[in-house]
Image (cartoon, rainbow, N blue to C red):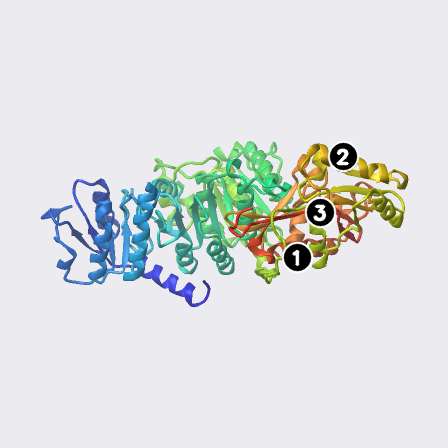
Amino acid sequence: MRGAAHREVVDRMRAFFGGKSVVLIGATDRSPWSIWTHANLRQYSPDAVVHVVHPHHEEVHGQAVLKSLKALDEPVDLAYIMVPTSAVLEVMNEVADAGITNVVILTAGFGEAGAEGAELESRLVDLAHTRGLTVLGPNGNGFINAAGGLTPYSLLITPPLEVGPVGIVLQSGGLASAVLAGAQARGIGISLLVSTGNEALTSASDIMRYLIEDDQTKVIAAFIESVRQPDEFREVCELALIAGKPIVALKTGRSEAGAKAALAHTGALAGDDRVVDAAFRQLGVIRVNTLEELLSTAGYLGHHLEIRGRRIAAITPSGGACDLLADLASEEQLEFPEFPPDTLAELGRLLPSFSNPQNPLDVTGYIVMDPRIALQSLEIVGRDVAGNYDMVLYTATIPRAEPPNPAMVEERMNALAEASKALAVPLILQSLISLDVTPYSHKLLGDRGLYLLSGIEPGMRAIGHGARYHDRRDRWLAVGPPITTPTIEVPAGAQGVWPEHMVRGLLEAHGIPVAPARLATSAQEAKAFAEEFGGPVAMKVASSALAHKSDIGGVALGVDTDQVTSTFDDLRNRLAVALPEATLDGVLVGPMRTGGVELLVGVVTDPTWGKVLSLGLGGVWVEVLGDVALRVLPVGPGEINVMLSELKGAALLSGARGTRPVDIDRLVAVVYQIAQLAEGLGEALDTLEVNPLRVDGDCVEVLDALAVWRDEGGSK
């Protein structure tokens, strides 16, 4: 949807959220939603023209009522529908007849209410398309355009409504007000908050497109129950990366209950939530675990997006805080470089003799006697931050209520604001523990352009998220979006499960190196092949009815030539006992391979994201360790290289424990070939698994493989 289509959506959203007049249809003093929506508009949208419509009332919310939309004597930008479910479609036609094109539907009872509601929602969508309506909802609370001064929102907004850099999109109505309250408690200003409801027509992705181009919005915070349009979502994330606007997302559904079962190991390893993690990571989305983390991270990035590095100079009033900061820095891959010698010397002269100047710096409890000591320490540290640090983290205690000596507090705050301006790197103010920003503390901060990061742990998590975001964005911008693989012709007879002896030819035909092997249909033929290869051989039973040979003991390794005949008979008997109705296609005979590292390379079809690449330690280790990195296809060679670096066993590829270092470029090229083949085969292929892929120096070859095809109906 790039180009003209993207522009059309953004323009529609801009008109939708930027209206100057609203008509509340179904307004009544008996409905809390109606009362609150009207109150919000009157308090936070004083310049907006508000009409109320109800066929049976004379006055609602202290305002004269229009009996119908036909009584409107001027154009209206937005209709807010609060009528019973059965009347919604009729009212939508009346809205269109009145020349109104933007509609919020508060009313529930549609797609969330079973088959009958889903049918009604389908009719609603058709009507909206026919009449040219832009619809938010149904079953949504509306929106709060704090920056634009329009607040048609059905739950009461508690003041103050602070305008700021965070745009919020929620696939939840009930949580919207909780998130707003959390933002207010942390002093986080918002540009726009939207509850998407059922997303019958306007999706979360549509709203994020608008926020990406909204000058007021610096970061997008999203609560996501499901990614309903993965292609749209992927494109929006790429646009956000280009624009440099982070998306911070809380995605529900982390349990493995919905994980996809598959005939291959790949399906078990690529559970639903692990795929979401992989997709978000490669798209630069910052995934968080709680609503609190969502807000603290979005607030930090909204005010400190310019901070790119990991080097912190920290000043605190507590040795315990220094310990917490150091522990969290280790978890978040943040750094506290030593202070330069001149800085240490000057701090030693300033601080009491019992202090131990280092980074993080504990200015000690002496600040109770001399509150200026922390600011003086900040001044000393600040002289040498350029080139040595990326930020200064300063623990600040901001009074929550006006003290008896407010002038002294204001003097310290003014000094802190001046110090912030004088620093060569950004100053981050942080409290020791998460506390609400009171009206008094909010004024102290806001009047001086300061922002307080609430709490040590939330703060350090947010800083870590910010550093990783910049890393991923830089990598994405350097490489660019991956190129989709052209369609590959599906081979004849592609159905059901293809074990190794059937899939080998497919791999070889597309240039993927496969270890040599011959399919023997008799013991004598197997012996001849073994003599041809020379030395010990590997023998594997081959049957189209058997997906995993090892399950029945159908693999024999290191077989000498004089044992081949008896081994062939043994493998045939094992198949007959385990699967009496299975047909023996033969026994694969190939030269024995030893040494090197065994990897799993698999592609499985996820029901939401499509083809997903799994890369990890293979062979016997795949089930024991589950050491795997995931990406949603398409991916390029650069991303595959990053996947290898993410593995816990990555050191094995560098020659650890006496192994030969792997030719990483060669390995990446082969993995990329496998990913391209799986992607190019499209919907016909459910799973392609290579396990193991043996790598030894510059030798990279497939030792075993499996393919699972879908039938014409799209299922396995």
Comparing labels 2 and 1, the label whose residue is closer to the camera:
2
Indicate the secondary structure of the residue bearing disc 3: helix
Pointer 1 local density, CA inside 10 Å: few below 14, some 14–19, many at least 20: some
Q: As displayed, is residue 644 above or below residue 10?
A: above
Q: Are marks 1 and 3 in contact (CB under 8 Å)?
A: no
Left or right for 661, reference 99: right
Left or right for 671, reference 633: right
Position of the N terminus, as image quadrant, is bottom left
> Which residue type carries mark 1?
Pro
Q: Nearer the viewer, residue 711 or 75?
A: 711
Q: As displayed, is residue 159 above or below residue 201?
A: above
Q: Nearer the viewer, residue 485 or 238?
A: 485
Residue 34: give x, y in percent of width and height.
21, 45
> Residue at label 1?
637
Please tell me which of labels 1 and 3 falls first in the chain.
3
Comparing labels 2 and 3, the label whose residue is closer to the camera:
2
Residue 2: give x, y in percent of width and height.
46, 64
Left or right for 138, reference 667: left
Q: Quadrant of residue 96?
A: bottom left
Q: Residue furthest left?
A: 58
Left or right for 165, reference 714: left
Residue 227: give x, y in percent of width and height.
46, 48
Please tell me which of labels 2 and 3 falls first in the chain.
3
> Which residue type carries mark 2?
Asn
Pointer 3 local density, CA inside 10 Å: few below 14, some 14–19, many at least 20: many
Residues at marks 2 and 1, CA–CA distance in whole angstroms: 44 Å
> Residue at label 3?
500
> Which residue type carries mark 3?
Glu
> Residue at label 2?
573
Please tell me which of labels 2 and 1 falls first in the chain.
2
Indicate the secondary structure of the residue bearing disc 1: helix
